[in-house]
Amino acid sequence: MLRKITLIVAIAIVFTACTSSEKSETLTYPVTAKVDTVDTFFGTQVSDPYRWLENDTAEATEEWVTSQNEVTFGYLNKITYRDAVKNRLIELNNYEKLGTPFRRGEYYYFYKNDGLQNQYVLYRKKGESGEPELFLDPNTFSKDGTTTMRGLSFSKDGSMLAFQIAKGGADRAEAVVIKTSDKSLAEDTIRNMKQSGISWKGNEGYYINRFAEGLNKSLGAKNEYQLLYYHKLGTSPSQDKVVFGDKEKLRFVGGFVSEDERYLIISASESTTGNELYVQDLSSPNGKIIPIKTGFESDQGVIETNGSRLFIETNYNAPNSKVVWVDAANPSYENWKDLIPETENTLSTSAGGGKIFARYLVDVKTKVIQYDLNGKQEREVELPGIGTAGGFSGWKDDADLYYTFTSFTYPPTSFKYNVASGESTEYERPKIDFNPEDYETKQVFYTSKDGTKIPMFIVHKKGIELNGKNPTWLYAYGGFNISLQPSFSASRVVWLENGGIYAQPNLRGGGEYGEKWHLAGTKMNKQNVFDDFIAAGEYLINEKYTSSEYLAINGGSNGGLLIGAVMAQRPDLANVAFPAVGVMDMLRYHKFTIGAAWASDYGTSEDSKEMFEYLRNYSPVHALKPGTNYPATLVTTADRDDRVVPAHSFKFAAALQENHVGTNPVLIRIDVNSAHGASNLNKGIETIADQYSFAWYNMGIIPPLAKKGM
């Protein structure tokens, strides 16, 4: 690929826009400079006039961000019921939230939020019946509550803890190691961690994966080469021993130590799909790293060990996944033996209490089967209802495990599960100002463009009239083998209780029906994802749930790409659009941070002429057409997003403001001190309040909550 940069030309882009509520309102967008930047792909020249916005720390970019936010918040501030929306969101989110406990050493740890705390607080109690004590409060890590805590890793005896802290919720983090007895620091902070994890061997050292930058510059640029190290407590990271990954270009290399601390399991991958698996016997002084499965055509991971047996979940020759076992002394996949065979339903697993728990997705709803370590089915776990269950993990000697159950109208509730009897008892149910009996959830199967049946959940108040006038929120993702399952959101209740409909289709590209479903929405099949989403909108319109005038479409990250592409292809589908932290420049996404790892789903513009042309055809930045009336749009991103860099949204917003004609506002909202998602609860509430207000305002609707104060 060749690139040329010539004369910079500043062009003022000034448009007028007005809402459906106030046609006389006029918006003037900031001046956005254009540069004469041209890339050449396989003999085809492609201009990139907003290339300068990729430098998000440059003074010119910062000035552009400030001026865009001034216009955006000036517009939002004129929505008279915006504060009422925010206040109701605060009311509904103000309830105690308690996470499921997990045992480490002699303590049980759990997360808790009193209601409106920006970050969850870590508590512990000695034994199951001990008195809870506050252990770590990340709300104290920064003045504005935007520093997050994640990646907890305890030594097996519970005496040591490593945890990661990140400013503004960014991916890049630092690790702190403390003694749990008195919370005193055990060593200096470990810096420059990203996509990293820690696994202890005893309490004197641990395995840690980090990118090679600053440690071995010959291995390439940041976010390209990740290595697995062994770190001895109290020594400098520069002295860490490389265990794996120093001879290949591997973007993700992780290691974890088995419960009995005999085996080190290593996973290595080039992208988000497909990994290699290795094992090292740590009980042998000269134990070699032995391959279990090489090549990147499938996903696999060790879920449990028992003596020398390794239990592996894999989709190798099993698109819906299965569980196999193999002896660690000779673990090559040729020796794998089926333990839990593949079925027609997608499988994911966990282990605890000396058992394996198989979680099946049956038309996107959870079913859990308990197996012993010989593959004998012992029982189906009786769940509280139809929805989503997660958990069922712990040590082998745990008599009780914990899990969480939720659905669209069932707030996340923790249950204690007795492994021997199979009895579930409610552990913690949140108390929230919400009556689930007022709402109903249905699942429909609609037909996409190529005839494929696509499932979709639809949630609304009981007795709603199907007259085509209901404000409807259509949300989807469609990528990276991620399944969108039923889940509860207190914030979503505000939309529902004010007469709104929430719809969530399960597009191809996700993992709802296994690897075949995933691959059907990747690379040269990516258009299937957009077609599936467009068909979901058309179904809702045809069935009179809503109409284009009252339809809002939303997605984030890969889902932001989805919304941008659908806006370009079908600007008439919806009245309002919310592309959030989206991957918008499909010709250059792989050049930023960890973007190259997404090539397994997207392909890149450098792969072939055919792939380049396919990407350019739907790339949101490039697919917008001059003189088009686009939906009322509120693009959202954040200044600290180091996963999908804000330049994607910057360039898309600039191109949208350039090409758009008509009366709809096309705005960008850039959050400060946040990353790939809100960095604290308050910022999340503010964003949702702005989105709901923007949607209702541009639909010409005054929600019932606003009328209460009139």
Image: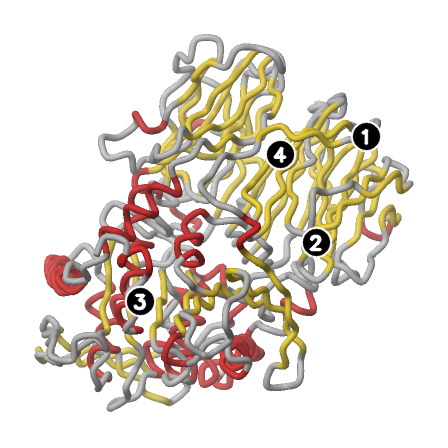
* Residue labelled with disc 1: 306
Looking at the image, which residue is at 38% across and 89% down?
43
Amino acid carrying mark 2 in the image: Thr
- Quarter of the image with the C terminus in it: bottom left
Q: Position of residue 631 (x, y in %)?
A: 31, 78
The earlier-in-sequence mark between 1 and 3 is 1
Identify whether 353 is placed above or below 61.
Answer: above
Residue ID at (41%, 86%) = 42
**Are there few (<14), some (14-19), or many (20+) residues within 10 Å of tag 2?**
some
Query: Does the residue at mark 2 contact the one at mark 1 (Cβ under 8 Å)?
Result: no
**Which residue position is annotated with label 4?**
256
Sequence-wise, the earlier of marks 2 and 1 is: 2
Say which element carries label 2: loop
As measured in the structure, the alpha-carbon distance from the residue carrying label 2 to the one carrying label 4 is 18 Å
Name the N-terminal-most of marks 1 and 4: 4
The foreground one among 161 and 548 is 548
- The residue that appears at 51% across and 46% down in the rendered structure is 435
Between the residue at mark 4 and the residue at mark 3, the CA separation in whole angstroms equals 48 Å
Q: Is residue 203 visible?
A: yes
Q: Secondary structure at mark 1?
A: strand
Label 1: how many residues lie within 10 Å, few (<14), some (14-19) or many (20+)? some
291 relative position to 448: left or right: right
Label 4: how many residues lie within 10 Å, few (<14), some (14-19) or many (20+)? many
Q: Position of residue 300 (x, y in %)?
A: 70, 50
Residue type at tag 1: Asn
Q: Which mark is residue 294?
A: 2
**Placement of 111 over or under 34, stated as above or below:** above
- Assign a secondary structure to mark 3: helix
Q: Position of residue 385 (x, y in %)?
A: 69, 47
Q: Is residue 334 above or below residue 141?
A: below
Q: Which residue is mark 3?
A: 696
Q: Nearer the viewer, residue 328 or 395?
A: 395
